[in-house]
Image: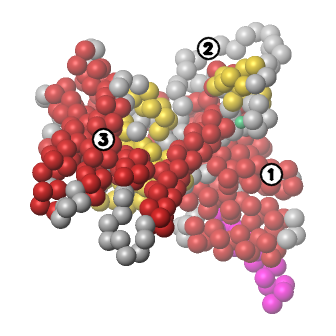
Amino acid sequence: MCEESSGSVRSPAMPEVVVAVDPPPTAPEVVTTRCDKCGVRSPLSSLFTLVKASSGLSSICPACKRRARNRFHLVLALFAVGMTLAFFTATVATSSPDERTYSWDGMWFPLFLLFQYVSIVPHELAHALGARLMGIEVFQISLGYGRVIATWRVRGVVIEIRAIPGIGVVRGATLRMNGWQWRMIAFIAAGPLANAALCVAALWAAGELPHHWDGGHGSEVDLLWLPLALANGVLFVTSLIPRSVETPAGTAQSDGSQLRSLLFKPIASPELRRVAYFQSRGTILYAAGDADAATEIATQGLQEFPGDVSLQWLLANAHQDAGEYAAGREIMLRLLEAQPAAGAPRAAMLNALAWADLMLDTPERLEEADRASAEAYALTPWEASVQSTRGLALVELGNAAAGMPLLRRALRDAERWEHRAVVTCSLAIAESRLGRTKVARGLWAKARRLDRKCELLPRVERELRPVTLATS
Ligand SMILES: [Zn+2]
Ligand SMILES: [Zn+2]
């Protein structure tokens, strides 16, 4: 349920970079894999997951896999809350009103489930504290899966709460290399150790406190302490099992897996650790909406590692976020030249290029936006950002009816409200082009509520203005 990244978080939505291979001399027929859940097709079959189904093996696209995982964690959380409420109600209902003591014995299991969620918080805070004590910069504390419902920045740390509980992630790294290995070990070990300490403390309390508190019904107090001890014991053990963990930002390694690497595997070179620091710090600042700080970190990293693709990609994205689309586009074009192989990285680059073209908003860029967004969509049609760009490109090309279904799908999957605002604005433009001004105006108001600084709001207003003048 928890995971730390000591560094290498890849830049915004940038998947694993594959080694460029020359395209074969004769273009073979493109073989595509189809997602058996949503029906999208892509030639990148390695990105699909094979799962057992009643009719044999079925292929699932990354978006359907993510949705299934989110649904699983939502059901689990609702089950824990539902069980607690059901047991609570049943206990109260079956006890006669003049009885002062109820039998709460059945509550221990639902409470154990609830405490598992609650105990993720001290686990992550202990990681953050451990990092601070070891002189490691904490970049981000993220709790949960699915849509982001709240974010803050507290003393430079981005805190992010998502809708579905079940995971916690602390991201941090450092440029100071002396004693790096042992400081990282302390940072990673602090989380599981906090759960072990809480487990022991709760066991002690269960044995000691009832004598002072119970007034004759000790089991009521045990009921709180024993499930708390068990929940923390389970978290301690599960976090130390070496495994890969699916996080909202991609696959990461469990505490146990990272400790094993730090203790028994060769340590990455100082250069790799330094470049990972810049990538991680910059990516999190970018995701938190601080384009200026992300640009600064990317620039600083590129002075040391000018050839690093992830940092160039980050810089291009940060430029675009700051509204410097021409600068972003130049970097994207260079990156694409070095990445001719059809794959997820190329799709992400094409998508960003098309977005820059659309935002530059000149007729001569529209053709490039069309070509790039079409190719990106052919490669990774399940990505919300790709659907959103392709959707707006189609709208701008005069085919709002074709763009609309893509935009609706993007709106369903976009997890950050800034992205939801962008897609809502795109939908407003599409509705306006189709003559449904009232609907468009409603969407404009909705996008404004989601993100007042949304870069597409002025465009929607421009779109709606002539109509407003005509009707007033
Ligand atoms: Zn942890
Ligand atoms: Zn699918």
Q: Is mark 2 within 8 Å of ligand 2?
A: no
Q: Is mark 3 within 8 Å of ligand 1?
A: no
Region of the chain picked out in magenta, as a range: 456-472
Does residue 270 show up magenta in the picture? no
Precedes in sequence: disc 1 or disc 3: 3
Q: Nearer the viewer, residue 209 or 177?
A: 209
Image quadrant of residue 71?
A: top right
Precedes in sequence: disc 3 or disc 2: 2
Q: Percent x, y for residue 16?
A: 52, 26
* Closer mark to the observer between disc 3 and disc 2: 3
Going by the numbered disc 1, the residue's amino acid type is: Pro
Q: Residue at x 15, y 39 (%)?
A: 134
- Tell me if label 3 and label 2 are in contact, CB under 8 Å: no
Residue at label 2? 21
Q: Residue at x 60, y 71 (%)?
A: 448
Image quarter hosting the C terminus: bottom right
Question: At numbered mark 1, what does the secondary structure look like: helix, strand or loop?
Answer: helix
Q: State the CA–CA distance, disc 3 to disc 2.
A: 52 Å
Q: Residue at x 52, y 46 (%)?
A: 76
In-image side of 143 versus 28 (left or right): left
Q: Residue at x 77, y 70 (%)?
A: 440
Q: Is residue 376 above or below residue 290?
A: above
Does residue 468 show up magenta in the picture? yes
On the question of residue 54 being in view, the answer is yes
Question: At numbered mark 3, what does the secondary structure look like: helix, strand or loop?
Answer: helix
Mark number for residue 405?
A: 1
Q: Assess disc 3: are there few (<14), some (14-19) or many (≥20) residues with their C-alpha within 10 Å of its C-alpha.
A: many
Q: State the CA–CA distance, disc 2 to disc 1.
A: 34 Å
Q: Residue furthest top?
A: 25
On the question of residue 301 being in view, the answer is no
Q: Assess disc 1: are there few (<14), some (14-19) or many (≥20) residues with their C-alpha within 10 Å of its C-alpha.
A: some
Question: How many numbered dots are placed on residues in this image?
Answer: 3
